[in-house]
């Protein structure tokens, strides 16, 4: 068993898709270990996405991720990181496989409904960014 970290991004929250996305996550066998409804400031979004700061879309990404509330969660499952990225699909919904969360809910490569950690190491860093010890079960 291991863990990954996810966010339901501002576009999906604004569109009323929290429930639909959590249902897909639970039906795929992920257990919710920690969860919160919150909003990133511009500064915190900049920190969260610091690894992307040299990329051309960084400013747009930080603006977007601080534009409204999100849902952050830590998820547990065998092979969590890889299986979750399979469940969410490609970054660009135009390339995402049928039945994936981004195929169903994402609007564009930027407003793409969900985040999924890309490694065990980043899953731990990202989970710790949002949740203290007493909020993780
Ligand atoms: P995350 O799970 O959110 O990390 O997505 P990812 O791993 O599939 O993509 P990546 O880490 O490369 O990019 C992080 C986020 O930046 C994406 O999820 C998008 O929201 C955004 N992003 C990536 N590429 C583009 C782009 O070309 N234009 C814009 N506007 N946003 C982008
Ligand atoms: Mg990524």
Image (spheres, rainbow, N blue to C red):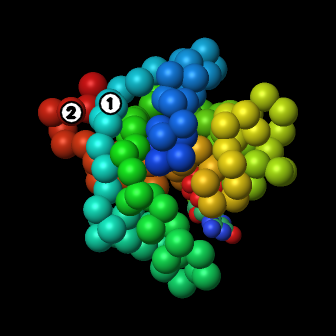
Q: Secondary structure at mark 2?
A: helix
**Quarter of the image where one finds residue 97:** top right
Q: Nearer the viewer, residue 12 or 78?
A: 12
Ligand 1, seen in the image, is in the quarter at bottom right
Q: Is residue 18 left or right of residue 56?
A: left
Is any atom of residue 50 visible in this view?
A: yes
- Compared to residue 85, the image places residue 56 above or below, namely below
Q: Is residue 42 left or right of residue 86?
A: left
Residue depicted at x 67% and y 37%: 105
Q: Earlier in the sequence, mark 1 or mark 2?
A: 1
Q: Is disc 1 surrounded by few (<14), some (14 to 19) or many (20+) residues within 10 Å?
A: some
Q: Nearer the viewer, residue 102 or 80?
A: 102
Q: Secondary structure at mark 1?
A: strand
Residue sticking out furthest to the front: 15
Residues tagged 1 and 2 counted as in contact (Cβ below 8 A): yes
Residue depicted at x 37% and y 45%: 69
**Quarter of the image where one finds residue 101:** top right
Disc on res. 135: 2
- Compared to residue 3, the image places residue 28 above or below, namely above
Q: Position of residue 65 (x, y in %)?
A: 44, 58
- Identify the residue under disc 1: 34
Residue depicted at x 54% and y 30%: 17
Residue depicted at x 48% and y 40%: 14
Q: Position of residue 93 (x, y in %)?
A: 76, 48
- Compared to residue 92, the image places residue 24 above or below, namely above
Q: Is disc 2 surrounded by few (<14), some (14 to 19) or many (20+) residues within 10 Å?
A: few
């Amino acid at each position: 068993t291991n863990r990954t970290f996810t966010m339901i991004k501002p576009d999906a929250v604004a569109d009323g898709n929290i429930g639909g996305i959590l249902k897909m996550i639970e039906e795929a066998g992920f257990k919710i270990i920690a969860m919160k409804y919150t909003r990133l400031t511009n500064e915190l979004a900049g920190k969260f996405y610091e690894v992307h700061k040299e990329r051309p879309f960084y400013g747009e990404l930080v603006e977007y991720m601080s534009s409204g509330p999100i849902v952050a969660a830590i998820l547990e499952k065998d092979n969590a990181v890889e299986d979750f990225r399979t469940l969410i699909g490609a970054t660009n919904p135009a390339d995402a496989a049928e039945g994936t969360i981004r195929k169903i809910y994402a609007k564009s490569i930027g407003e793409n409904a969900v985040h999924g950690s890309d490694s065990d190491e980043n899953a731990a860093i990202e989970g710790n960014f949002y949740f203290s010890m007493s909020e993780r079960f």
